[in-house]
Image (cartoon, helix red, strand yellow):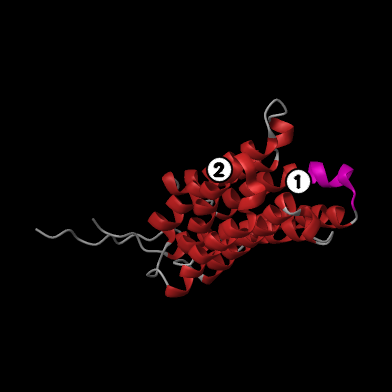
């Protein structure tokens, strides 16, 4: 006996779906500008507002559509990213860098699950093997400076590259978002472990690529989920 294909389709995005991204874009610009101007009194609070505003954009853009595990994974990725952004503020009793790595590691696991199971539309492209080469190269460059964090950083690099690799199977928007997210953490890692080699302008660059990457992933996921026909069992 065959199963009839599902006739329903995820509700199309409302024409105002992108409005939810405007507050995120504005605060991102303010935050990046504050970093460039070395104004921590503005940069720190705006940083903590970024992921909540992006979560609002995700909820606003996806309203009227199906919810469930994909929505939970998307919001979970943003929640753990927020905890990583605010590691020092939220967990002052703990060492900042391990908490940040752990929080973002969980965020990437959410993204990998979401993108692989619900968003990927294409086979794994051969060019995405560059992310494995990136992981090896980063470890070779950073290993002498990592000390006791060597294995934690190596593990984090795997899930970071995993997000970029799974994003490469999705739409161009999501794929670009994954690349920018990886670029952000690459610059950040070099700033943390090899600060003498990184000029001052790389400070705002970290958040420019981070905000753009996260925003593109969320926007791409919303658009894909809105146009994909459910697969019959």
Dot 1 alpha-carbon crowd within 10 angstroms: few under 14, some 14 to 19, many 20 or more: many
State the residue position of label 2.
152
Q: Quadrant of the N terminus?
A: bottom left
Look at discs 1 and 2 and give the one toward the viewer.
2
Does residue 146 appear anywhere in the picture?
Answer: yes
- Outermost residue, front direction? 144
Give the side of residue 16 with respect to residue 156, left or right: right
Earlier residue among tags 1 and 2: 1
Residue 154 vertical position relative to residue 202 in the rendered view, above or below: above
Magenta part of the chain: 38-46
Identity of the residue drawn at 50% across and 51% down: 159
Q: Is residue 45 magenta?
A: yes
Q: Nearer the viewer, residue 163 or 138?
A: 138
Point out which mark residue 86 bears: none
Does residue 66 appear anywhere in the picture?
Answer: no
Identity of the residue drawn at 73% across and 35% down: 88
Q: Secondary structure under badge 2?
A: helix
Q: Quadrant of residue 202?
A: bottom right
Dot 2 alpha-carbon crowd within 10 angstroms: few under 14, some 14 to 19, many 20 or more: some
Point out which mark residue 47 bears: 1
Q: Nearer the viewer, residue 180 or 129?
A: 129
Q: Position of residue 15 (x, y in %)?
A: 59, 64
Q: Main secondary structure of the magenta part?
A: helix
Q: Nearer the viewer, residue 167 or 187?
A: 187
Q: Is residue 29 magenta?
A: no
Total numbered circles: 2
Residue 77 vertical position relative to residue 61 in the rendered view, above or below: above
- Outermost residue, left direction? 1
Q: CA distance from mark 1 to mark 2?
A: 24 Å
Give the side of residue 1 with respect to residue 172, left or right: left
């Amino acid at each position: 006996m065959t199963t009839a294909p599902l006739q329903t389709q995820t509700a199309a995005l409302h024409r105002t779906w992108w409005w939810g991204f405007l507050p995120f874009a504005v605060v991102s610009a303010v935050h990046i500008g504050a970093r460039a101007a070395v104004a921590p009194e503005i940069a720190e609070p705006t940083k903590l507002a970024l992921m909540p505003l992006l979560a609002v954009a995700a909820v606003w853009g996806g309203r009227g559509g199906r919810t469930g595990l994909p929505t939970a994974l998307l919001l979970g990725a943003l929640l753990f990213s927020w905890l990583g952004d605010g590691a020092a503020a939220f967990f002052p009793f703990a060492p900042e860098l391990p908490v940040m790595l752990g929080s973002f590691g969980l965020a990437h696991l959410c993204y990998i699950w979401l993108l692989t199971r619900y968003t990927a539309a294409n086979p794994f492209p051969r060019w995405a093997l560059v992310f494995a080469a990136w992981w090896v190269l980063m470890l070779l460059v950073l290993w002498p400076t990592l000390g006791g964090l060597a294995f934690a950083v190596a593990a984090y690099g795997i899930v970071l590259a995993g997000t970029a690799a799974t994003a490469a199977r999705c739409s161009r928007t999501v794929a670009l978002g994954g690349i920018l997210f990886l670029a952000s953490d690459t610059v950040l890692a070099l700033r943390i472990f090899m600060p003498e080699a990184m000029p001052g302008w790389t400070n705002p660059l970290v958040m420019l690529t981070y905000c753009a990457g996260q925003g593109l992933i969320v926007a791409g996921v919303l658009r894909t989920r809105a146009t994909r026909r459910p697969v019959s069992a």
